[in-house]
Image: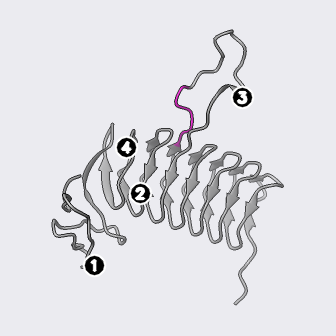
Amino acid sequence: MQASAALIHARAEVADSARIGEGTRIWSGAQVREHASIGVDCVLGKGVYVDPHVTIGDRVKLENNVSIFRGAEIGSGVFIGPHSCLLNDKQPRATAPDGRLKTDADWIVSGVTVEEGASIGGGCTVLPGVRIGAHALVGAGAVVTRDVRPHAIVVGNPARQVGYACECAGRLAPDGSCTECGRAHDLGPGRDGQSG
């Protein structure tokens, strides 16, 4: 079976130098900037913004109005809910100390990394330099200020860990088994399925 070409809405803006994988759908109002790389079979909803040089894996869903800024690396199978923002500047200022408008040369990019299969709920903010581990779940509205372990469930502002999740998104019991599908997980020494 031959893969289908990408579908790009007439009102989306995609830079000529961006790489878009086969089967990917980019909807109205989305903007994909220069040298961004989007994998195969992705969905970029209405109003999504992808900054230059961002890397996005395969089968990723970015819901409406998600903003992903330079330096971000998004693994395959990631879900990011509507109105979420992945930041990249630890010391944001519009102007330099001498009063001139800052340029790219005046700041250091500190992108967010989201590993394979992780999910970020709607309305979340992920601070610069944070790594979200594989298959982690970030609850809606969370402000993620530090790294999130693989399979961890985090909620709140600032986000705090409240348990662990399976690949199916079911909660893990203290022995590491999924309460939904029964899959077993080794959470490592000193960890249980409830806290981190």
Residue closer to the observer: 75 or 137: 75
Of labels 2 and 3, earlier in sequence is 3
Circle 3 SS class: helix
> Mark 2 is on which residue type?
Gly
Numbered-mark total: 4
Task: Read off the residue under disc 2.
Answer: 133
* Vertical side of 8 occupied by 41: above or below: below
| First-in-chain label (1 vs 4) | 4
Task: Locate residue 120, reporting x and y percent.
Answer: 43, 54
Q: Which residue is identified by label 4?
A: 142
Give the residues drawn in magenta, as a range.
Answer: 86-91
Helix, strand or loop: magenta stretch: loop
* Mark sitting earlier along the chain (1/3): 3
Q: Quadrant of residue 7?
A: bottom right
Looking at the image, tell me whether mark 4 or mark 2 is earlier in sequence order.
2
Label 4, label 2: how many angstroms apart (C-alpha)? 16 Å
Q: Residue at x 27, y 49 (%)?
A: 161
Near mark 2 (Cα within 10 A), the count class, few <14, some 14-19 or many ≥20, is many
Q: Mark 4, residues whose alpha carbon is within 10 Å: few (<14), some, or many (≥20)? A: many
Q: Which residue is mark 1?
A: 183
Q: Nearer the viewer, mark 1 or mark 2?
A: 2
